[in-house]
């Protein structure tokens, strides 16, 4: 464990989390959420939890991003109300 | 130049032959990696869940690069439902068989009375059987989740 690397990744995770909830476009939010998942995966792997990192990489960065994009395809550009 | 533009106009949006070819080459390796993760799950990182997600992601990749129909043609809805139920049945079947053979639920060493391999070998092999069941179920459920979400449940058109 290298605490400088931990700190850097944690700062990036917080920056990504803030960006996800502030950005207006849904597709951009999904892609930033994928980046967030990948950074969490790096963090797990760096802290020694390789199994959790593997799950985060496959499910968080892989499947859930695709599922979010598929859900966005079913939405409209502007809301009705 | 004009002819090239016309040909580009005839193509569907996101219909790129580079993506199609690379996905066609990539899918077998993704599936091989998923099988590797499932089979080596009991003594290295990974396991049934992660390997199943990797296997399901290969079919989702096929649906993304081509279309939903190609994905369904390669992995039909009937086979999907069958594999999901078989996976769940393998998991609960192995677990219940342990209880029937006189051990606890998911206590694989009880299976030693069925086929005498030794209780320690059965603990390793029982985890492998359960991982295969989990992998099958997770793969099918991930693929059907994507099919249902991207087509609105109708399975006719989508991403």
Image (spheres, grey):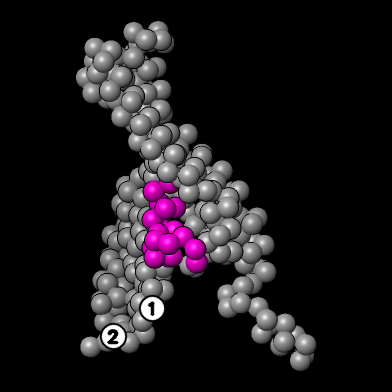
Q: For numbered disc 2, what is the local secondary structure? A: loop
Q: Secondary structure at mark 1?
A: helix
Note whether B72 is above or below B115 in the view shown: below
Q: Residue A15 at what x, y percent from top left? A: 29, 75
Is there one chain holding both mark 1 and mark 2?
Answer: yes
Count neighbours of disc 2 (C-alpha within 10 A) and say few if under 14, some if 14 to 19, many if 20 or more: few
Q: Nearer the viewer, residue B93 or A10?
A: B93
Q: Which mark is residue A28?
A: 1
The residues colored magenta run: B140-157
Left or right of B3 on screen, residue B20: left
- The question of residue B152 being in magenta is answered with yes
CA gap between label 1 and label 2 equals: 17 Å
| Residue A38 lies in the magenta stretch | no
- In the foreground, B119 or A39: B119
Q: Is residue A37 above or below residue A27?
A: above
In the image, residue A7 sits, relative to residue A76, either above or below, namely above
Question: Relative to the observer, which residue lies in front, A76 or B52?
Answer: A76
How many residues crowd around disc 1 within 10 Å: few (fewer than 14), some, or many (20 or more)? few
Q: Going 58% across and 75% down the picture, which residue do you hit?
A: B14
Name which residue lies at 34% across and 14% down.
B111
Position of B143 with respect to B109 (left or right) is right
Mark number displayed over residue A60: none
Above-or-below relation of B110 to B131? above
> Is residue B149 at least partly visible in the picture?
yes
- Which chain does tag 2 point to? A
Residue that badge 2 annotates: A79
Q: Main secondary structure of the magenta part?
A: helix
| B124 displayed left or right of B74 | left
- Where residue A23 sits in the image (x, y, percent)? 31, 82
Residue for point 62% across, 67% down? B19
Q: Residue at x 41, y 70 (%)?
A: A69
Residue A45 in view in this figure:
no
């Amino acid at each position: 464990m290298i605490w400088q690397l931990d700190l850097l990744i944690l700062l990036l995770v917080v920056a990504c989390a803030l960006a996800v909830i502030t950005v207006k476009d849904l597709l951009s939010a999904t892609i930033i959420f994928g980046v967030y998942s990948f950074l969490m995966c790096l963090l797990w792997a760096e802290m020694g939890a390789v199994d959790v990192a593997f799950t985060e990489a496959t499910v968080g960065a892989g499947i859930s991003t695709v599922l979010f994009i598929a859900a966005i395809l079913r939405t409209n550009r502007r809301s009705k109300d | 130049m004009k002819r090239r533009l016309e040909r580009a106009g005839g193509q569907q949006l996101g219909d790129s032959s580079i993506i199609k070819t690379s996905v066609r080459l990539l899918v077998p390796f993704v599936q091989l990696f998923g099988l590797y993760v499932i089979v080596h799950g009991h003594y290295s990182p990974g396991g049934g869940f992660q390997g199943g997600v990797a296997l399901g992601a290969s079919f989702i990749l096929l649906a993304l690069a081509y279309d939903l129909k190609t994905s369904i043609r390669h992995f039909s809805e009937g086979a999907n439902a069958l594999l999901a139920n078989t996976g769940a049945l393998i998991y609960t079947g192995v677990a219940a068989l342990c209880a029937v053979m006189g051990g606890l639920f998911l206590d694989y060493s009880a299976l030693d009375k069925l086929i005498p391999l030794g209780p320690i070998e059965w603990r390793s092999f029982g985890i492998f059987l359960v991982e295969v069941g989990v992998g099958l179920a997770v793969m099918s459920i991930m693929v059907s989740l994507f099919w249902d979400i991207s087509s609105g449940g109708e399975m006719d058109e989508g991403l």
